[in-house]
Amino acid sequence: MAKTPKSSLWGEVEVEVDIKAPAAKFYHVYAGRPDHVAKATSSKVQACDLLEGEWGTVGSIVNWNYVYAGKAKVAKERIELVEPEKKLIKFRVIEGDVLAVYKNFIITIQVTPKEGDVGSVVKWHLEYEKNDENVPDPENFLPFLAEMTKEIDEHLLSEE
């Protein structure tokens, strides 16, 4: 029996979060100044360092130090895709704690202005490949991402 390229170990989860900040402003945090994420949400992200390339450019390597479930974690990510007109940026985890249980882990952030209303919608899309069937889907990351998004939104609004 032929094996399909995407096995049952592959999956996707996502969460959408309503924010008050303009889409361009929130997008710019991740595309242009992700080091500001640590300022906005210091209880979750301690540092974000550019290791190679330039902020917001494909191929650049970014290192994140964060706290998840009460434990210090690290993720080194490569920027895979940047689409300013769609306010979309995609990161692939290339080193770090998450790769202990996932072979592949891709994070896409897209920010869309609300039509006819103030604010935006931030969509976090996680695509992953588990190491084996015993690894849980990363749905437990979604509340963490939603809380972080709200904290960044509050920070952006306080800057105005």
Image (cartoon, rainbow, N blue to C red):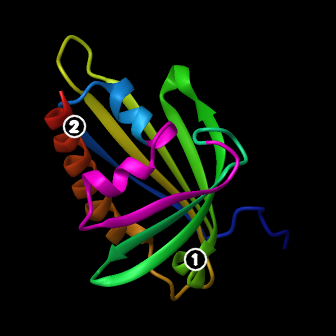
The stretch in magenta equals 30-54
Quadrant housing the C terminus: top left
Asked if residue 148 is positioned above or below residue 56 in the image, the reply reads below
- Is 31 one of the magenta-colored residues? yes
For residue 19, side relative to residue 61 (left or right): left
Estimate the x, y position of residue 152 in percent, counting from the top left.
Answer: 26, 46
Q: Secondary structure at mark 1?
A: strand
Q: Secondary structure at mark 2?
A: strand
Q: Quadrant of residue 27?
A: top left
Q: In the image, what residue occupies the spot 34% across and 34% down?
A: 26
- Identify which residue, 95 or 18, lies in the foreground: 95
Q: Quadrant of residue 41?
A: bottom left
Estimate the x, y position of residue 157 in percent, counting from the top left.
Answer: 17, 33
For residue 108, side relative to residue 79 (left or right): left
Estimate the x, y position of residue 102 in percent, counting from the top left.
Answer: 59, 76
- Identify which residue, 26 or 90, lies in the foreground: 26
Image disc number at residue 12: none
What is the residue that sits farthest to the top in this orientation?
116
Q: Quadrant of residue 120?
A: top left
Between marks 1 and 2 in the image, the one whose residue lies nearer the viewer? 1
Q: Which residue is mark 2?
A: 18
Asked if residue 38 is positioned above or below residue 157 in the image, the reply reads below
Estimate the x, y position of residue 28 in percent, counting from the top left.
Answer: 43, 33
Asked if residue 62 is positioned above or below residue 18 in the image, the reply reads below
Amino acid type at circle 1 is: Gly
Quadrant housing the N terminus: bottom right
Q: Which residue is mark 1?
A: 96
- Is 21 one of the magenta-colored residues? no
